[in-house]
Amino acid sequence: MSAPAEPGAAGTGTARRRRAPEGPRSRVPAAALNAVSLAAGVGVWAALAGAGVQGLPGPVEVAQRGWELGADGTLVQDALASLRRVFVGFALGTALAVPVGFLMGWYGTARGLLEPWVQFFRTIPPLAIIPLAIVLLGIGETPKLVVIGLGAFLSCVISTFQGVIGVDSTLINAARVLGANDRVIFARVVVPASSPFIIVGMRVGLGSAWATLVAAELIAAQEGLGFRMQHAQIYYDLPTIFVGLITIGVLGLLMDRLLLAAERRLTGWQDRR
Amino acid sequence: MNKIEFRGVGKVYPLGADTVTALSAVDLGLADGEFVTVVGPSGCGKSTLLGIAAGLVEPSSGSVTVDGGPVTGPGPDRGVIFQQYALFPWLTVRGNVEFGLKVAGMGRAERRARAERYIGLVGLTDFADALPKTLSGGMRQRCAIARAYAADPRVLLMDEPFGALDALTRVRMQDQLLDTWSRERRTVLFITHDVDEAVYLGNRVVVMAAGPGRVQEVIDVDLPYPRTEQTRLSPEFAALRNRVWRAVYHQPPAKEG
Ligand SMILES: Nc1ncnc2c1ncn2[C@@H]1O[C@H](COP(=O)(O)OP(=O)(O)OP(=O)(O)O)[C@@H](O)[C@H]1O
Ligand SMILES: [Mg+2]
């Protein structure tokens, strides 16, 4: 039985053995290209704001607001509150997803029992769970963490599951003919072979955790980047919204880079460019 | 007593509502220390036969015994070398070679020494700490051979191990294999689709036929070991090669059913 293709997890492609065609490699280092591209983006933004696009604050204005929010401590406080939620939700979600994904991939019974639920909940956007979470869990931290964790769990569980069922059967046979029993095969073959998928799942899960954050902070939060933006929206305070957006983007990117670095270390054995 | 004995071995795979007879009534015995090669057209059940001896495939009928005991599953007494190398890509050459020893519970120092020895035997000493992705096809295959040898199996089952190699590497690997085999005599069942290779390596060549998969003919190769380039160029070799070629490529049409 094969699960339907998971666009998020499979499409990320880092777990694939696919080789990119050997195209002409640029002589300009990638970092320089990135910097040029960023500068150009900010330039376009400044130009659009300068041309008087309705209500669009320019980079300078946003930087000023960022400085203000940073100076009075609001930004740090909000960022820490959001980071804590993302981190705790993500950690809970993935900590549950990895064993569940393994169970589903390894035992037909577990797959039969769990798969309908995972597939069902996967079709519901985590945001749609918010009303339910409020009614059942109140307006404290718990419903926010549950909603963020659920998003991370669902992305990660599917990826782990696919990693496990995709383990090359010749590798399992190779271990068996060397005398390995099921327990050894699981620990020494299945776990390492599916680790690239698990890490991809974690990266997708992290993205999903950030995506859910702002909505989760709609649940009567007193602080947090999502809350701050929500609050600013009421006063048409566009610079603050921009500061919030950029902060979320930068933090998300940093966390993703951390996972990417972990991925490089843990799955560097993969044959890819 | 034969080292490996196939008795009336048959294998039927389900194919949709229908079935495919991959093997039908195969009788074959391999003496201790014998090198037996198997050739035959694609789909005639060579891999199935090897899988049954390895204990990875269960026969539908008949039985296989190793040293008189029935095969009930895979075991470290029978080393298998797969066509796709099947190295663990997250382990170094050394890690791969040590895998079976670790599973067997061998102590660290002994494991090290043993792996060292077999890595040296296949000429990979300088690459002991390299990951498989950095090795060439021939080096991967040698690593797979070292891994199988290190577990010290009494029987080696090899499924087209040199199939993916270029002609030059292939010849070198064949000589290396014969060299190791003559030093540490094991019973070898070697599958290939290359008639030259079958004759060059084997004590006997088993020619199989398809539809249903069966043993067509067993040809004795009475060329002395060690075999060298001289052997390859000898008229005796050419004669045997022609005989095997005819047996493989001019098979009587398959009987229906
Ligand atoms: N797992 C399987 N399920 C169903 N049919 C199978 C399976 N494995 C092999 N077969 C069938 O059994 C027959 C023999 O297959 P086998 O792989 O043993 O052939 P082979 O001689 O090794 O071929 P090749 O030289 O191409 O490797 C084929 O017709 C194949 O379709
Ligand atoms: Mg085959």
Image: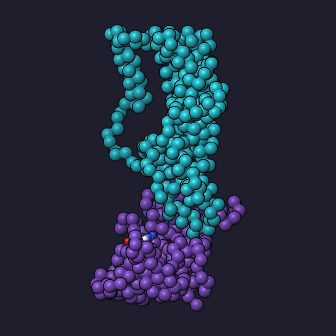
Chain colours: A cyan, B purple
Residue A170 location (% of width, % of height): 50, 63
- Which corner quadrant of the figure contains ligand 1? bottom left
User: Residue at 60% of width from left, 21% of height from top?
Assistant: A220
Residue furthest to the bottom: B1
B180 vs A203, nearest the viewer? A203
Q: As displayed, is residue B21 above or below residue A87? A: below
Is residue B29 among what the camera can see?
Answer: no
Residue A132 location (% of width, % of height): 58, 33
User: Residue at 33% of width from left, 82% of height from top?
Assistant: B248
* Residue B180 falls left or right of residue B151: left
Is residue A110 among what the camera can see?
Answer: yes
User: Residue at 45% of width from left, 10% of height from top?
Assistant: A60
Residue B104 location (% of width, % of height): 67, 66
Number of numbered tags placed on the structure image: 0
Q: As displayed, is residue A246 above or below residue B143? A: above
**Quarter of the image where one finds residue A149:** top right
Check the picture and name the quadrant holding the C terminus of chain A: top left
A151 vs B88, nearest the viewer? A151
Q: As displayed, is residue B232 above or below residue A238? A: below
B9 vs B29, nearest the viewer? B9
* Residue A101 falls left or right of residue B238: right
User: Residue at 50% of width from left, 62% of height from top?
Assistant: A169
A138 vs B122, nearest the viewer? A138
Residue B148 location (% of width, % of height): 55, 68
* Residue B205 falls left or right of residue A179: left
Q: As displayed, is residue B182 above or below residue B151? A: below
